[in-house]
Image: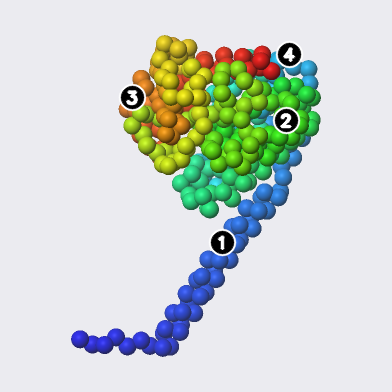
Amino acid sequence: MRKRVFDRKNLKFSMFALFLLAACLLLSSCSGMSEAKSKVQSKLDYSKQSLWIYKNDDGGSTKKADCFVINPTVYVANGRDNNMNVNDPSMKRGFLSAVNEQKGLYSDYCAIYSPYYRQASIEVYSMSESESEKYFDIAYSDIENAFLYYMKNCNHGRPLVLAGFSQGADMCIRLLKDHGNDPAVKKALVACYAIGWRLTEDDIAKYPHLKPAQGGNDTGVIICYDCEAESVKKSLVVPEGMKSFSINPLNWKTDSTPADKSLNKGSVMPDGSIKENLTGCYIDPSRGTLKVTDVSADDYKAGPSCFENGEYHIYDYMFFFQNLKENVAKRIQAK
């Protein structure tokens, strides 16, 4: 057997090449972080009407409250920037469609405010937390900027419903972490409907002013849950080993008491129709997720590839639409 002899000259060259490669990767990483930081620092001007999907800011609305609605993820990057371009007309059309699907929960009782923002793409959810956070930071910087503009120029002391689904719900909770204890926000807040995201014990420990809803008409609270089949043990929203605070949108309990489908006053079907008594649900005592009992995962597909079969995330508010809508009215009345 021949002995392998290292060529010192080639070895030195290889080590130099590796050094150059590492330096290039480091510079690329630093460049990416610098670009993300630059985007966070470059604030959008929310005094411009073009940055609002809805902006009912005349201060004289006949509705009893305002609702600040934050859109879910509609942007697919497909190799483009992982934060949406708010000046792209096609992206804006997608935003309008998405907010119209959920604003029916709130528009009977609330003047609607909903900003465009540089939301993170769906691809970001497949990244590690260290990779993805810079894109969510950019999204949040816009939401925070829009919300502070709204509070200063549009709220006028009116009751406020904060609402979001999925990425929008994540942004809602981030807002309340940073501003939920601000006197004006605290006074105005009817409730935060953070549907399709998580609220953990760590969140509450770090931000004790965050209050999970305990019933059907308490105010200044967060209504939070994410739907899944009974067999699901982990999901993108609530990973294995994590537990979220939740409330059942049919019986408004926070324990695992089952709610029969007879309590379900109306679900939105794929064709846009409303069907009563579609499904019941209960809260999983170990995961805190909402287990949906009377539908099949084969009939209600998970949607984007980052969700697995049985994760009913995209139906979170659709399954319980009428009950949620009635609850919005009750909490506004209670405020």
Q: Quadrant of residue 180?
A: top right
| CB under 8 Å between discs 4 and 3 | no
| Amino acid type at image mark 4 | Thr
Marks 2 and 3, how far apart at CA? 41 Å
Residue 224 percent across, percent down from the top left:
54, 29
Where is mark 3, residue-wise? Answer: 296
Marks 1 and 2, how far apart at CA? 38 Å
Along the line of sight, which residue is nearer the eye, 154 or 255?
255
| Amino acid type at image mark 1 | Ser
Where is mark 1, residue-wise? Answer: 29
Marks 2 and 4, how far apart at CA? 21 Å
Marks 1 and 4, how far apart at CA? 51 Å
Q: Earlier in the sequence, mark 1 or mark 3?
A: 1
| CB under 8 Å between discs 2 and 4 | no
Judged from the image, the secondary structure of the residue bearing numbered disc 2 is helix
| Amino acid type at image mark 3 | Ser
Marks 1 and 3, how far apart at CA? 44 Å
Residue 176 percent across, percent down from the top left:
65, 35
Q: Earlier in the sequence, mark 2 or mark 4?
A: 4
* Viewer-nearest of discs 1 and 2: 2
Along the line of sight, which residue is nearer the eye, 248 or 193?
248
Judged from the image, the secondary structure of the residue bearing numbered disc 3 is loop
**What mark, if any, has residue 185 been given in the picture?**
2
* Viewer-nearest of discs 1 and 3: 3
Q: Is residue 103 above or below residue 11?
A: above
Residue 89 percent across, percent down from the top left:
61, 36
Q: Is residue 45 above or below residue 260?
A: below
Q: Quadrant of residue 185?
A: top right
Where is mark 4, residue-wise? Answer: 62
Task: Say which quadrant the N terminus sits in.
Answer: bottom left
| CB under 8 Å between discs 1 and 2 | no
Residue 73 percent across, percent down from the top left:
53, 36
